[in-house]
Every structure is written in structure tokens, then in C-alpha cells.
Amino acid sequence: MASPLDLPTLSLGDKVKERRIQERLASLCLSPERVQKVRDVFLEEMELGLASAPTKKSSLQMENTFIPELPDGSENGEYLALDLGGTNFRVIYIKYQDGSVVEEFVDYYHVEEPIRLGPGEVLFDFLADCIADFTKRRNLDTKQLPLGFTFSFPMTQKSLDVGILVSWTKSFNCPGVVGEDAVQMLSEAINRKGLKVEVVAVLNDTTGTLVQGAFLDRRCAIGMILGTGSNGCYIEHVERIEKWKGEHKEKEVIIDIEWGAFGDNGVLDFIKTEWDRAVDQESLLVNSFTYEKYFGGKYLGDLVRHVLLTLTKEGLYCGPASVLSKQGTLTTSLVSRMEKEAFEGKTTETLEALQKIGLNASEEHAAIAQYVAGLLSYRGIQLVCVPTGELLKRMSKNHCAIAIDGSLYEHHPRFKVLMEKLLKDFAPSYGFNLFLARDGSGKGAALAAAIAERLQRQT
Ligand code: BGC
């Protein structure tokens, strides 16, 4: 029976075939030397990203979020939060009393493809329509409510309530928003609808997760998303952020790393395989978001599919190739299910799923698919642990709680256990715990709005 802690193995009746497949897929196994190299490159890119006059452009944005404080138990009042980043958009209402949640509503709205790819103004009007619908149905429409906006895309932040979109990622590509302030566009749409809502904070989903994580566990200092896309943030000492010019009195601030783009400048090409290139080529935004494409939920299923397609073309796997040539036929949720079955020592469900998508699969093919799913998942987890381990070392806390949100982490059976093992290997002197902060990305936005008000009262 396979263990989530071990590198996957393949055992076929036909030993020649077994060896051929293993050799063909050897580039998917990251040796300790290559992991070390990824780590060295990450540290270099991190410093470049924080430098005031970098010698070259880093692929890590290391963005200042302007959130210098975490929830402190003094949260009081009613807040709205929006969470936009995936195909489901969330509107949230939370009422706090002395740092505790006393009332909470969450509604989901599906963002159809024409809105995800259509003009920016239409997208923001849609968001305002959802707020109008939510506040009306919940009888909140007569109240003046502050709002925190989780906008899960790379932004350049000028302050807590200004976020200029750097680029779209994942499944969004609305013309007319890159280079614009998302808060301004949202506020204009809110005003067009005449809603009594004021946007007081804009943040990334990792930041939301860290803030919500700190609300749940005061030791939280890392927020992470392992979902459709991936990213992480942490708490940095201000004196290490060379590029933050001008006067400021904060001691620490949350930095949004934007590790999804790690490697966009070519620094990680030494681990890039032909399958990573194939997934990138058919993605919405080619040549960008390199790291995220190695393991993000939007891509993991397609990576497995591309590997199987190669094996089919080389006579090592079943067909028809036309099934495996179609983007999206093999989903990340199927990868999670295949991994789960492999850990149970079974192949029944995997085989059924492969046949259902149209493959002429046998038991042996199910075992090969599980092997490929395992190799790619293992590699992805190694890659997630590189930056995380470095953050633990950098912050040097006795104990750091790591809040994670996202369906990949929640549903993939290998992530939590293997991450715990690898992080212990990568950062042996530092205590940590991983915990799921479900919906943290959105709920943290309500807390960010409360923090924004607190900061305003202090000035
Ligand atoms: C975005 C990040 C986000 C991550 C997880 C990436 O594509 O650039 O800002 O945090 O996805 O949602």
C-alpha cells in the first residue's frame, strides 16, 4: 500500500514496461540537490524583490499589503467582505462583539465565463449587483457598512485601500483593469447602484487567510492558498523591506509574496519539464505564473493528463490519445481521488473514472495513472514546502501557525501529511502547525476592514 509520505513507486507485471515508464518520468522527481537549488533561487529572488535598487528584476513581487497589525480582540461592529478570485464569488457579512463573531452570513455567486473574460466595468457592475442582492435579502440595505475586498490577483498596493492590478491570473482576463485601481473601480460600481457601502481595505486572499488565521490562532504568521492558484504571505520586519521608502512608523507588515509567479524570469527553468511547458502553452496567460502551474488546482489534473498522453504516444499507456488531448478531461479532483485510492491499496474507483472519461483502461493503466498522480503531487508538495520552510527560518519564531485555505489542501489526501514531514526536514529547528482556515480568504477581509478602521482611529 502506498504511503503519502513516500515517493510513489510503480509495480507492474511487465518489468520492462515498468522500468521504461520510470525512466521516462525521472525528470518529475526532484532530487535533494535540485530542491536545494530551488531554495537558493527562492532566497535570492526574495531579497531582490525587497531591494530598493535591485540589480535585476525578481519574479517575486514581495508586495507590501499595508497591514501592520493583526486582530487583537477589540473588533466590534458590522462589516461586509467580498472574495473574488475563482469562479465562485462570495459576499460575506460579519458582526463582531469584543473580538468574537456574533452573526455571520455568506452567499456564493457564480461568475460566468463571459464576465470573467468580458470588460472590467461589467465585472465590477456584477460585483455591485451581488452586493445589492445580498444586502437586500439580508435586510442590511439601510445600514452604512464598511467593506473589505479580497481581490486574489497580483496588485501593487499604495495603501490599504488602493490596489492596482498587475496582471490577471487563473481564469480571469477582463480588459481595462490591468493598471487600474480595483478599489476605485469597485467603488464606482457601488456608487452607480447607490449602495451604502464604503470600501476601506483591499487585500489578497493569502493576506485574508493570514488575518483570519491570526483571529483563530494568535501564533499565525503565514497565510497560504492552495486552491485553483497558489500563493503565500508572511509577517516581515519593516527594516528588511528596503524598497518601502518614505516615512512610516510600523514595525512589521504583511508581505504578499506572489509566489505563483516564481520562475517567470526563467530562474527555475532547470526543473521545467516538457509537460509543464505543454500546460503553460494551453493556459489563458502563457509564460506567466510558472510556479502556480507546477501544482495549482487549475493545472494539476492537466499535468497528469499530459504525462499520460506522452506515455500513450510512446506505446506505454492506453488511448485513445484524442481523449487525453482535451484540456480539462482529467481534473485535479480526480487526481485527489486517485491518490486516496492508492493510499488504500485499491484501483477500482480510478479504473472506473478512467473508463468514464473514455479511456480503454485496465487495472494496469489505473496503477500507472495513480503513479503519475503521485509523482506530480509529490513534486508539487516539495515545491510548496521550499518557500514555506524558508519563511519559518526567516521569521525564526518558536512556533508559527500556518493558515491555509483552498480546495487543493482541503481535499488532496497527500498535502497536509507530506507538508508536515517535509517542513520538519527543511526547517528542523522551528515549531509549526498547519491548519485549514476555510473561507479565511474572505472572512479575513472583514477583519481587514476592522483593522483599517482601527488604524484610522489611531491617526
Ligand atoms: C494570484 C495570487 C493569489 C493566488 C491564489 C494567484 O494566481 O496571483 O494573488 O493569491 O492565485 O488565489
Image: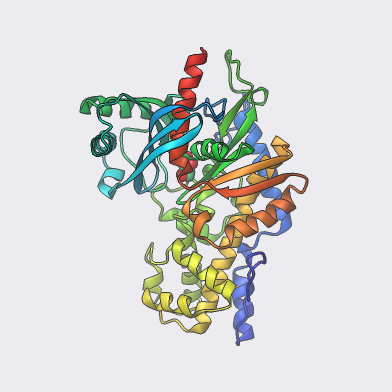
**Residue 81 placement: quadrant:** top left
Of residues 92 and 241, the one nearer the viewer is: 92
Residue 442, horizontal then vertical, whole percent: 43, 40
Q: Quadrant of the N terminus?
A: bottom right
Q: Residue at x 47, y 75 (%)?
A: 350
Q: Is residue 142 left or right of residue 305?
A: left
Residue 203, visible in the rendered structure: no
User: Residue 162 location in percent, x, y?
Assistant: 42, 24
Going 49% across and 46% down the picture, which residue do you hit?
289
Does the image show residue 295?
yes
Reply above or below: 64 against 41: above
Tally the numbered discs.
0
Extreme residue in the left direction? 193
Q: From the viewer's perspective, tell me whether residue 106 is left or right of residue 277.
A: left
Q: Residue furthest right?
A: 429
Work out which residue is located at the far bottom of the displayed protein and give it. Answer: 13
Residue occupying the point 49% across, 66% down: 335
Residue 110 in the figure: left or right of residue 57: left
Relative to 48, say whether 368 is above or below. Answer: below
Q: Position of residue 122 (x, y in %)?
A: 24, 36
Colour mapping: rainbow
